[in-house]
Image (cartoon, rainbow, N blue to C red):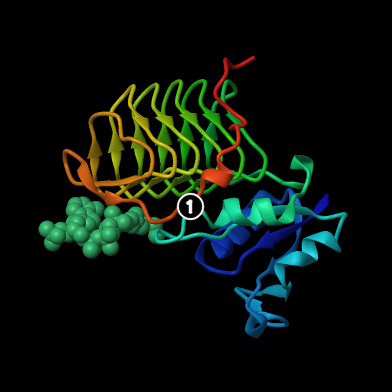
Amino acid sequence: MSGLLIVGAGGFARETAQAVRDTGEFELLGHLDDNPDLHGTEVDGVPVLGGCDLVHELTGARVVICVGNPRDYAARARLVRRFGLPLDRYATVIHPTAAVSSTSRVGPGSVLLAHCVLTAAVQVGAHVAVMPQAVLTHDDVVEDFVTITSGVRLGGGVRLERGAYVGSGALVREGTTVGAWSQIGLGSTVLGDVPPGEVWVGSPARRLRAAEAPALDELATRTTVGGPLR
Ligand SMILES: CC(C)(COP(=O)(O)OP(=O)(O)OC[C@H]1O[C@@H](n2cnc3c(N)ncnc32)[C@H](O)[C@@H]1OP(=O)(O)O)[C@@H](O)C(=O)NCCC(=O)NCCS
């Protein structure tokens, strides 16, 4: 059983820690967080071992990055760039109640929380966060660093480009694309393509404003997913 470090000690990191316990797949070593006030404390009974750069000292441990929130959803991408770790250092955490079809793929560093569903030939890239009860249906492509929050429903053949954020309970019509680093508000209904770098809200969803998150051109390297499944 390999040791696992969870980067971050906030809400998503704590949820991931619970999922890790439920999988029984890893020895959970603890959280890493750059807030020095947390060092030496415990969150939900899990120790905060020290700052994030401990990933470079604890070289035998696998890593999953669990930071970010609706106002800063590029945080995982920034840490991945800062660490520069090889992809095989990153673990994939899939809660045992997640229904992942045998024809679907999930990349390194990604986390699937309880009761999410990947129906058929779904491709999920690296460092993707999928919150409870999200439903991803046939042929969806979810690029690296995407965040899919609880209760999202994606129709078939949807593409979420790199770093996109889909708010709780949003619905995305089949065959549509949400552009890189764009954000969909909670409860919204996306009926057509959303360009990169914009915030869309409502039902039907309309443009609200430009996305704040990225100055992310420098993070716009190729995604790890998108080709035909082999
Ligand atoms: C889309 C979002 C990022 C916009 O945040 P914001 O820029 O701070 O927007 P504001 O709250 O200032 O609202 C601006 C306008 O958009 C509207 N609006 C905001 N979010 C909306 C939504 N999800 N659906 C419909 N309208 C929305 C507001 O009513 C307001 O309209 P008004 O100007 O006519 O009064 C945010 O509302 C959101 O949905 N975040 C996702 C939260 C989430 O899913 N969390 C779950 C995981 S923690």
Tell me: residue 186, above or below residue 120: below
Residue 127, how many percent across, how many down? 60, 45
**Which residue corresponds to the image point at 35% horizontal and 42% vertical from the top-left?**
152
**Along the horizontal axis of the image, is 60 left or right of 152?**
right
Question: Which quadrant would residue 135 be assigned to in this image?
Answer: top left
The residue located at (86%, 63%) in the rendering is 57
Quarter, ligand 1? bottom left
User: From the viewer's perspective, is residue 204 above or below residue 141?
Assistant: below
Residue holding disc 1 = 215
| Disc 1: CA contacts within 10 A as few (<14), some (14-19) or many (>=20) | few
Is residue 167 visible to us here?
A: yes
Residue 197: image quadrant is: top left
Residue under the image location 29 percent in, 43 percent down: 170
Task: Say if 124 sits above or below 139 in the image.
Answer: below
The residue at the point 52 percent across, 21 percent down is 121
Picture mark count: 1
Image coordinates of residue 84 in percent, x first then y, are: 74, 50
Query: Which sits in the foreground, 51 or 207?
Result: 207
Seen from the viewer's position, the closer of residues 177 and 19 is: 177
Q: Secondary structure at mark 1?
A: loop
Residue projecting furthest to the bottom: 37
Q: Is residue 81 above or below residue 52?
A: above
Residue 128 seen = no
Quarter of the image for the C terminus: give it. top right
On the image, the x and y values in percent for residue 20 come to 65, 54
Q: What is the x, y in percent for residue 71?
A: 40, 61
Locate residue 19: give its quadrant: bottom right
Give the residue type that dot 1 points to. Ala
Cβ of mark 1 under 8 A from ligand 1: no
